[in-house]
Image: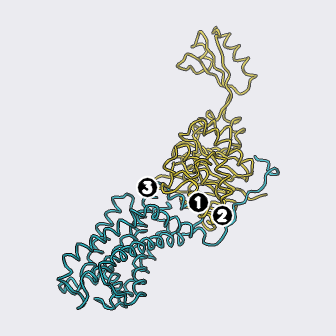
């Protein structure tokens, strides 16, 4: 069995009275596209910071590609690229200067070929000599991604990379990250856009109050926690509600069910109750429902 | 789960040479002040020149020091050293606090740099800026004074030691301060008085005995006095004593700074 890309064992971190991480265990295989989800304050960024060596856990251990982030920090950091959540940049330098400097920090002196490749992939070639201050927010975000990739790390962590990013850049970014994943890079993503996580991630961990409350493949999570939905517009809302439906403010009533085979029986009971069906909509299970359900249960 | 058979194992790029990370951080720190050299080098040189012109105009005909040394000649090494010290402090402290406040310090914390490399890069860059400014002050002073250099090795030793000590002070202040206001307080209420009251503008033998005694508790006095010895071959106190005091200061500050960095004080929570 190959070394996991990331191994987190019983990691705890306390800030005063706040327990940021309460004994987190997690293993992410090489080549995975992994999602780390949770509400604000769940501990996602603390966990990422602990992996990156920015936060020192109170107990437990973290490894990146088999390298302990404290004892073997040099190799652990060489194996990791982090795209931070905040739009931070050094205003003194141009894009190319920044990428050369970042390469140098990782021990790489001549890196122009790879830098050119990253710039081209992120559509930044024409901005290579522009000062960081002159770039738009979206461009700065791309430079952050480029900085995380200069040393070609096997493991890439993206901490809410699409927060406040326009649709076009978001699409381009995901296309690029998918390609990195296809090439063999392990991707760990945190995001508040659950539809993105559902589309991209093969496996997902959900955190709440510093603890992992769900960990499974996206498919299994959808199967386990989410139900299909049937929304109906009827002339007798009270009758539909009496059958277990939830009335919305728009006058529609929503029912949950496990398989499409249940729809026919549900419609039959509606008819028997005297409610006449005007319109109906079927809804697929989605991660948002799973998320709400998991957070509610935890 | 991914199909691992289709994937090639990704390896991080190999390290080209030892200490490349340290050298890059040093280069970045030098480039940072060099890109704004009008502000970081030229302006302090002009400041020192103004001090020189004003004080020499007022005092040169009235004061001699160490018997025969004209006041302007006496003043120049003090101004040079003061510039070295203040600029070395300003470099590391301003670089760190700017990086902390803007958040880009993360780009230095994420790579595999050791805390010793971090310390050495910031302190050497600060010392270099101090020396650049010091040499600038010396050069622009030349047309106004006849300045001997009795022992260049003493000059260089104290200039470098002063730069390293204040560079370390700057790292401590830059890491400790959470806002520019706190850093300015450190500079204005600690560094500036100690520098100004260290014998830059006078020989401590011109002071009442009690203030002469107090001056011996100011390590900056020993930095400037030892530096001045290199020019004139005479000073207020023995250069060996100055060297001993300065060396002890350096060891203490280096140890303190390295301990802070090793713990990740205010950098790694």
Q: Horizontal placement of A238 versus A204: left or right?
A: left
Q: Horizontal placement of B238 versus B91: left or right?
A: left
The residue labelled by disc 1 is A102
Q: Chain of mark 3?
A: B
Please, which residue is most extreme toward the front here? B143
Q: Nearer the viewer, residue B158 or A171?
A: B158
Label 1 and label 3: CA atoms lie apart by 19 Å
Residue A57 visible in the snapshot:
no
Q: Residue at x 33, y 62 (%)?
A: B184
Quarter holding the N terminus of chain A is bottom right
The residue labelled by disc 2 is A110
Q: Nearer the viewer, residue B206 or A3?
A: B206
The disc at residue B101 is 3
* Callout 3–callout 2 Cβ contact below 8 Å: no
Chain given the colour yellow: A
Residue B198 coordinates in the image, percent (x, y): 28, 79
Please, which residue is most extreme toward the right here? B5
Chain given the colour cyan: B
Residue B216 coordinates in the image, percent (x, y): 28, 84
Q: Secondary structure at mark 1?
A: helix
Marks 1/3 same chain: no
């Amino acid at each position: 069995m190959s070394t996991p890309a990331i191994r987190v064992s019983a990691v705890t971190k306390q800030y005063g009275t706040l327990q940021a991480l309460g004994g987190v265990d997690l293993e992410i295989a090489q080549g995975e596209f992994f999602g780390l989800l949770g509400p604000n304050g769940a501990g996602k960024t603390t966990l990422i910071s602990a992996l990156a060596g920015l936060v020192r856990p109170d107990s437990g251990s973290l490894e990146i590609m088999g390298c302990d982030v404290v004892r073997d920090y040099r190799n652990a950091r060489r194996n990791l690229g982090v795209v931070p959540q905040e739009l931070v940049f050094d205003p003194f330098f141009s894009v190319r200067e920044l990428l050369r400097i970042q390469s140098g920090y990782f021990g790489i002196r001549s890196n122009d070929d790879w830098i050119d490749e990253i710039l081209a992939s992120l559509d930044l070639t024409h901005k290579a000599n522009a000062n960081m201050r002159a770039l738009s927010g979206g461009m700065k975000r791309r430079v952050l991604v480029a900085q995380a990739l200069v040393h070609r790390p096997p493991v890439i962590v993206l901490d809410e990379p699409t927060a406040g990013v326009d649709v076009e850049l978001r699409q381009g970014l995901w296309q690029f990250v998918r390609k990195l994943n296809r090439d063999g890079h392990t991707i760990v993503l945190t995001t508040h856009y659950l539809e993105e996580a559902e589309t991209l991630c093969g496996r997902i961990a959900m955190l709440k109050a510093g603890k992992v409350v769900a960990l499974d493949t996206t498919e299994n999570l959808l199967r386990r926690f989410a139900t299909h939905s049937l929304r109906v517009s009827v002339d007798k809302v009270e009758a539909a509600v009496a059958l277990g439906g939830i009335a919305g403010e728009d006058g529609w009533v929503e029912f949950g069910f496990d398989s499409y085979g249940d729809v026919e029986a549900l419609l039959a009971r509606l008819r028997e109750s005297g409610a006449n069906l005007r319109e109906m909509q079927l809804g697929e299970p989605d991660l948002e429902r799973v998320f709400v359900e998991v957070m509610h249960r935890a | 789960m991914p199909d691992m058979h289709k994937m090639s194992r990704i390896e991080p790029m190999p390290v080209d040479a030892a200490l490349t990370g340290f050298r890059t951080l040093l280069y970045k720190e030098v480039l940072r002040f060099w890109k704004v050299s009008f502000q970081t080098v030229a302006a302090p040189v002009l400041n020192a020149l103004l001090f020189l012109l004003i004080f020499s105009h007022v005092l040169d005909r009235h004061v001699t020091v160490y018997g025969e040394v004209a006041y302007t000649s006496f003043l120049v090494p003090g101004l040079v050293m003061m510039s070295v010290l203040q600029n070395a402090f300003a470099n590391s402290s301003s670089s760190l606090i700017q990086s902390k406040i803007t958040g880009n310090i993360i780009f230095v914390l994420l790579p595999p740099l050791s805390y010793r490399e971090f310390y050495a890069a910031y302190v050497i860059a600060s010392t270099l800026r101090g020396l650049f400014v010091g040499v600038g002050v010396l050069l622009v002073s030349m047309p106004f004074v006849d300045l001997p250099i009795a022992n260049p090795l003493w000059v260089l030793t104290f200039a470098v030691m002063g730069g390293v000590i204040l560079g370390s002070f700057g790292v401590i202040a830059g890491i400790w301060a959470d806002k520019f206001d706190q850093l300015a307080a450190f500079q204005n209420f600690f560094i500036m008085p100690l520098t100004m009251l260290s014998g830059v503008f006078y020989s401590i033998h011109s002071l009442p005995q009690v203030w002469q005694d107090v001056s011996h508790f100011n390590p900056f006095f020993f930095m400037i006095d030892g530096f001045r010895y290199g020019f004139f071959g005479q000073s207020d106190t023995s250069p060996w004593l100055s060297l001993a005091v300065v060396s002890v200061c350096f060891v203490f500050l280096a140890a303190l700074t390295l301990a802070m960095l090793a713990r990740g004080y205010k950098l790694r929570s």
